[in-house]
Amino acid sequence: MKLSPTEQHTDPSAEPAPFPADAEEVVDQAELTDSGVRILVLAEPSGAYTWRLVPSDDGRSPEGPDASRVDSAVVELLRAQRRVPTRRGGVIEFRAGAIPEGGTRPRRFDRQPSSNSLTLVDISGTAYVHKKYRRISPSAREPELLRRLDHGGHTPRWAGDYRYVSPGGGAAYPLGVLYEHVTGEGLDSPLRENLRSLWPELRSSPFPKATVREGLRPLEGILREAGACLRRFHHDLATALGDDGPGDAYPVGSALETASRSLAALGRRPPVSEEIPVGLWDAALDALRAEADDLRLQHSEGVTFHVEGESGPCHGDLHLSHLIMGAGTHSRRPGSIRIIDVSTPSPSNPDWKLRSPLADRVALRRALEYFTTDEALDHGARLLGRDNTDAAVAAVLDAARRPHPEASWPEEDLAVLRTVCQVADVWRGRVTELLLGAPGDSGDEGRRSPLHRLLYLNRLLHELTYNQDHARLYHTAMDLRYALARVPGPSTTRM
């Protein structure tokens, strides 16, 4: 790895020069005073920019400095709100809110998978997350968003952040952020525990809806509060961004064009595996085309696609695990839930106008579909002593009323799998209703706004494309099951 300075790069926004395939070039660097740590700004062969912390002595050690030393140095620089000059005329800016006085020490961190570097640091008895972004990009807006949302009570408390400002007062690139650690568990944890505890009763219940209602009663409060928290978060986000928000007019035409392009691209491809019959693949795409055609017709007829509250900024990448419940909290209490990993894009992002609070609701709906189907397939496969992926393929073939290509699924096994999937759908419908205040069954699609349907269609197409690209048969089978359920009925706008 080449770590000598180069005159060829002075700004990560500049066009990168070609490098050997195994090389990284240092484009700028700064010494973090009295810390024994140096920041290197690096250009990769791909043209992307990243950064690294190295010991100050020679900058060539293959290992970075001890994480606790880095955390301590960053906290001190944040407290002092220092501006550290870089060798090429840039600056590392440190800004902070309220950080307690006192020393720092590392804490053990049960980390979830992340594309960034995370450590947990104790400052005077309070735990803080120190997140360091691996890539240098202006699109990393989380630090600024946490700062603006700091007093709303729906996101982690912002303590400070630091960024690289390129030479000549150029663009600012977030490097890291410090925020108070939110203790508790993601919303997926109690949902998983609840569904697994209900399996024996659900499989044998003659009235699964009643069984589900009673079984979910302990979670009603926290699910309703999670939905209310999301609505308050959207309000606070719109207020914090003000004129920086995406505006009121959602670009329906652009979103319909995106759907058309995705459908055309998928239509030119074979299924991800020979286990998915071409006829089933075509039927699923036909169902999605029919949905797109119906929405396109409504748009051409001048139908209003969204109602009040469906325009504005959103989280951007919301999952069930991003809704964190306070430790031991299953009650409906304002402030008992925090939303983490805010990914609202920059207004310079080409997709900025395609944002809506409804997109977060659609994201949670799709998350619940994946979550519930995964749990159902796992449970069904365990009952039958089968592989989860084989169960996923069998389930979508059964839903499409197509025989399994192999004669290894007798009707009695399919009946067990079918029952498990059906009662799981009932459970998911009730959870969706409690969380989002909306009908949870695909058969209720006509009761949703056209914009909700359009956002759902594009998200499903995006996920189906991703799973095809990465040869994920298991997830593709789940996607196809929901695609086949998209055959649109008469729209309420024409009733």
Image (tube, helix red, strand yellow):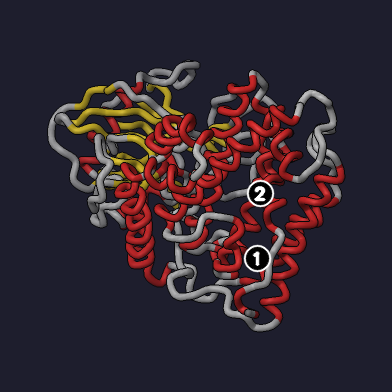
Where on the picture, by quarter, is residue 257?
bottom right
The residue wearing badge 2 is 482
Q: Position of residue 325 (x, y in %)?
A: 31, 41
- Disc nearest the viewer among 1 and 2: 2
Of 216 and 392, which appears nearest the observer? 216
Locate residue 333 relative to residue 385 in the image: left or right. left
Indicate which disc residue 339 carries. none
Of 65 and 243, which appears nearest the observer? 243
Q: Residues within 10 Å of mark 1 (few under 14, many from 20)?
A: some
Indicate which disc residue 255 carries. 1
Of 211 and 175, which appears nearest the observer? 211
Rendered residue at 81%/45% (across/down): 280
Asked whether disc 1 touches disc 2, contact meaning CB atoms under 8 Å apart, the reply is: no
Quadrant of the image containing the N terminus: top right
* Residue 227 in view of the camera: yes
Q: Secondary structure at mark 2?
A: helix
Q: Position of residue 298 (x, y in %)?
A: 68, 76
For badge 2, the amino acid type reads: Tyr
Q: Position of residue 490 (x, y in %)?
A: 68, 72
* Residue 167 in view of the camera: no
Tell me if residue 425 comes above or below residue 246 in the rendering. above
